[in-house]
Image (tube, coloured by chain):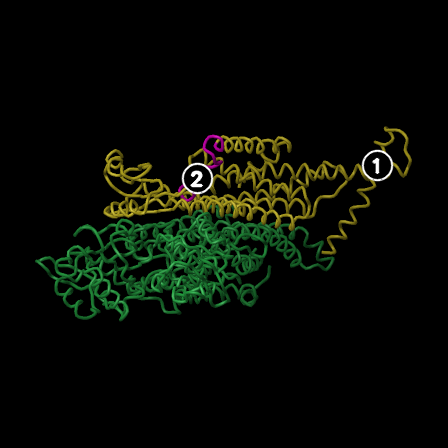
Amino acid sequence: MPLLDAVIEKVTGLDAKKLVLVPLIVLLLAVGVLVYSQLAFGTPVKLGMDFTGGTLVRITTPETKDELLAKFSEFPNVIIREAGDEKILQFGPMSAAEKERLIQLITSYPDYEIKDVSPLFGKEAQVQTIKALVIAFLLMAVVIFIVFRTPVPAAAIVFCAASDIVIAAACMDIVHLELSLGTVAALLMLIGYSVDSNILLTTKLLRSSPVSGSKKSDMLKVLERLKAAMRTGLTMTSTTLSAVFAMFVVAACMSSLSEYYAPIPLLRDISIVLIFGLLADLMNTWMFNAGVLRFYLGEARAAEMKQRASTMVKAKKSKTKAAETGEVAKARKTEKGVKKPQKGGERRGR
Amino acid sequence: MVGERGSLLRDVRVSVFVIFVLLSLFVIYVYPPPPMGAGINGNLKYGLDLVGGSYLQLKLEGVLVKVEAEKSEIIKHEIQELLREKGENASVEVVAENETATVLETAAPLTKEELEALNIGVVSVERLSTSLENATEENVTRITVTADEKYVVTRYLENALGADVEPAVYRGTEVYEIRKLVSKEELEGVLAAVNASIGRDERGMEFFVEGVTPETRDLAKEIMETKLNMLGLRDIPIRTVGTDIILIDLAGVDIATARKLVGKPGKFEIRIQTAGEAGEIKKGMRLEEIKNITAHVLYGDEGIASVGAIPQQRRTDDIERWGAPFTLTREGAAALRDACIKYKAVEEEERERHELAMLLDDVVIYSAPLSPDLANELKAHPVYNLIAETGSGEEGRQAAKELIIHLKAGALPVPVEIIGSGEVPAPLGEKFRHEAALAAALAFMLVALVVYVRYRNGRVVLPMLMTLVCEVIIILGFAAATGWQLDLPSVAGIIAVIGTGVDQLVIITDEILSGAATMQSAQKARQKKGKTPVKVYLRRVAEAFNIIFASAATTAVAMLALALMALGTLRGFAIITIVGILIGVLITRPAYARIVQEIA
């Protein structure tokens, strides 16, 4: 696929440090959005009625917004949104008697949907959501650390997952999507989804890690593996994105094409959050995580070299710095000779 | 690779896969036989957001509390209160006490009736003389109250809080279940009056829990089930969460009916007017408003023996009136007769001013004077058969029907608060069902397109898509076999599984295809060393499965957290995702890897 290859060439051609920087800047911006929302509205993401309590009603009626406002003026905090004939009415918490009356009024419409959440339930949902997010994230982190056992790559994956969620949440703020139980499920789903491609990447780069004397050929091998991983990974994310996109199209757009379809808010919200999260994940995986791993593999190798070189230097009791650098070069050469057969042995062992 | 069809089918992984797909189709379409007209749905059940209906989330209101109290303190306090009400300021002293009885003395004269009205146990009263000189002058009342501590505390809390209280055992601790939501402060105030306090558990924490015991919860659930069954609804899923939350899905019931039927306890009470003018009590008034001008006669749970099965119609003055006929117990009938005679409701001139009021959940549903016939009958002997009139027309008939259900099934043991409810009307549910199917189909097509564009090789793409389809079939088979109701969150879960499932197939495919490429170039070299090409595949597949297991594990743990969220609204999504992942990792992926090896 020429397009896929072009993208891969472009991204892998960039400098690792620059690659890491872009996702970090985006993350900072996202954090900024969340902080702004926290200061302005009291929560990082605006809470929907699943969490605040209230009554939500969907009716299909030709009545105008003002007519409806007058009709429902006796109920507390009426907010009316409209999309064609479909009107969404939202009410604040009300007494049982008021609720009975409201239900009577609403059920007189031929086409309606009612959802009612008590503030008590909302409070409970808030507590449980925070619990679920924290537990899910911690469990995911534990699984990642058990699988990879090396701190830097594992931490990079966990960081990517966190960044995905933060960016997706910030995008929710930007498009004025409220936090509902559906979007919470989507954020939790992101924890699972976003880790997928990262695991692929890290496994491919760390397993059978390149060992050769020259740093340059090392990096070339890393890039080669990265490209292979990216081919698989981009395909994976695009299949997932297309499945989620299908959900979005049906749940959000079909109703504007034909009277026959009604929007499905739950599926729409889930798909929007997943789309944002998956896009953020593309960036985080193939720019941030890939950059970090390239850096890590390069650095780790360099550090290893240095250490070996210096021990050898000590053994030879070299006196001048110039001589030391010379020794490093020698040490590398010896290394090359020693290590290669070792690796072969390893392979046979498997 | 060299391989024949036969060898592929003999492979354990492939045959397990095929067996599961066939089993799934079997449970969906063959056994148990699907209902008539089910068509393509077979045995699959849909949640109410896909078929229409309403749901209720109810919280049972109650408090479980451990109480540290002295029986004698409570009895003394109650008798002192009684004396104060009577305007006496004599003191009360406890003179003897054991586990079953308490003896108290006071200078003021008290009758057995007065003390029995306190409702703190079996009472006996003696009037004694303390002075030896004048043995005929009785100046001390000796009261013996026979009751154990549990009984006394229960009655005291009931009197003070105006709620039912039951002694119970909760998590191995003896507690009192207050069947009403009271605040800790209120309870502490009530206990402080008798020098009692809230008891502590073994960790030194005050034992005060909002909620009810599992027994009470189950009783409430049972009563709700009975009420729904009487409405003609079978197999209503009622789930309980923790000890105080009940979730009910009512397919095919509108929200107003659902709220009326199980959203309130259904406590029936008959009261009689004791003061005020004729016609002062009106339908719809609350108990608080009429408490002072009426007296309690009986509760439905204790006073009613049986209830007629269908609403009864009566025609008076050309107006059709509907009502719920019921029969009183012997005690109930006696209580009614006593009350009517005591308050002169049976006297012709007083009749109009002493209406008989019937309340459902503390709201007056009917109030009227006794009819002259009934008054005369009551004068002569107890009357057993009564009708609670509910009004005229269709509305009256509906109300009578609901009242009959409440009277028959009895009141819930505790008040309930509706903490959430909603309704998806049936036509909308049907739309959602079609759209959900459309979304899944479209997702599948888009995924197929992406995969095809990527590989451009039918020999790879077709097995991949077949595997995906089979995976969804196995998930649906699981749903059919367990009676799981597919709701919108479940559909989202299935789409998510299509998305992740294909991811993992892509990983396997890429590993095996690139493995095949390297193998071809390295084949000769390896054959010299005596290595079979199969080993290359196995190593590749092993690496692919490492990645798959790791990513499956992370998704599963994230979804586990969601599944365990107690409110359970999105449990469908979480469970379907987890089941899908398990099916994928354990059944379909191994088979797919084997199949792709064969054809690559």
The residue marked by circle 2 belongs to what chain?
A
Instruction: Output the letter for the chain in yellow.
Output: A
**Left or right of A294, for residue B307:** left
**Left or right of B367, for residue B37:** right
What segment is highlighted magenta in the picture? A37-51
Quarter the C terminus of chain B occupies: bottom right
Q: Which mark is residue B51?
A: none
Q: Residue at x 29, y 43 (%)?
A: A258
Residue that badge 1 annotates: A310
Instruction: Output the letter for the chain in green.
Output: B
Res A221 visible: yes
Q: Secondary structure at mark 2?
A: loop
Residue that badge 2 annotates: A47
Residue found farthest to the left: B318
Q: Secondary structure at mark 1?
A: helix
Residue found farthest to the front: B133
> Sequence order check: which comes first, mark 2 or mark 1?
2
The residue marked by circle 1 belongs to what chain?
A
Q: A52 or B431, which is in the foreground?
A: A52
Quarter the N terminus of chain B occupies: bottom right
Q: Which residue type carries mark 2?
A: Leu
Q: Which of label 2 and label 1 is nearer to you?
A: 2
Q: B365 or B161, which is in the foreground?
A: B161
A153 vs B149: above or below:
above
Residue B499, how many percent across, how many down?
A: 48, 49
Q: Which residue type carries mark 1?
A: Ser
